Image (spheres, grey):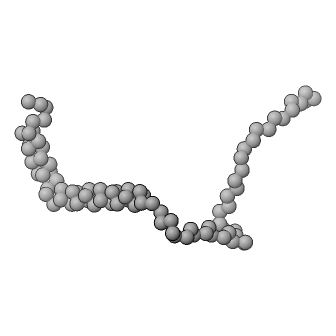
Amino acid sequence: MGIFDWKHWIVILVVVVLVFGTKKLKNLGTDVGESIKGFRKAMNDDEKPADPTATPVPPAQPQATQSVNQPHTIDVQAQKVEEPIRKDV
C-alpha cells in the first residue's frame, strides 16, 4: 500500500466535490479544455510554413512631419571617453 491508495483518491474526490460543487468543477474542466485547445492551435499555427507565393508587405513609410506628442526614439551606443588628468588644480 502506497501513501495514496485508490481508497484515498476516492475520499479526496468526494471532499473536492463537496467543497466546490459539481457545477464549478464542470466549468473549471471546460475552461481548462478550451485553453488547451487554444494552446495547441497556436502551436500548430506557428509551425505552418509561410506561403511562398504571397508578396511581402512593404514597411510603412515614415511620416515627413511627426507630431509633437509622439514619442521619439534615439538609437545610440555609449562609449567610454578617457579624459586626461589635470594636475594644475
Q: Residue at x 93, y 29 (%)?
A: 88
- Count numbered badges in the picture: 0
Question: Which residue extends farthest front?
Answer: 53
* Residue 54 coordinates in the image, percent (x, y): 51, 70
Asked where in the image residue 42 lies, by quadrant, the reply is bottom left
- Side (left or right) of 54 relative to 8: right
Residue under the point 69% across and 71% down? 63
| Quadrant housing residue 2 | top left
Is residue 1 or residue 56 the one in the foreground?
56
Front residue of 58 and 76 = 58
Residue positioned most to the right: 88
Is residue 30 toward the left or the right of residue 43 in the image?
left
In which quadrant of the rendered image does the N terminus lie? Answer: top left
Specify the quadrant that holds the C terminus: top right
The answer, for residue 24, to whether it is visible in the render is no
Q: Position of residue 39 (x, y in %)?
A: 34, 57
Q: Residue 79 lies in what quarter of the image?
A: top right
Residue 18, image x and y in percent?
11, 51
- Is 16 placed left or right of 60 in the picture? left
Residue 16: where, in percent of width, then height?
A: 14, 48
- Outermost residue to the left: 7
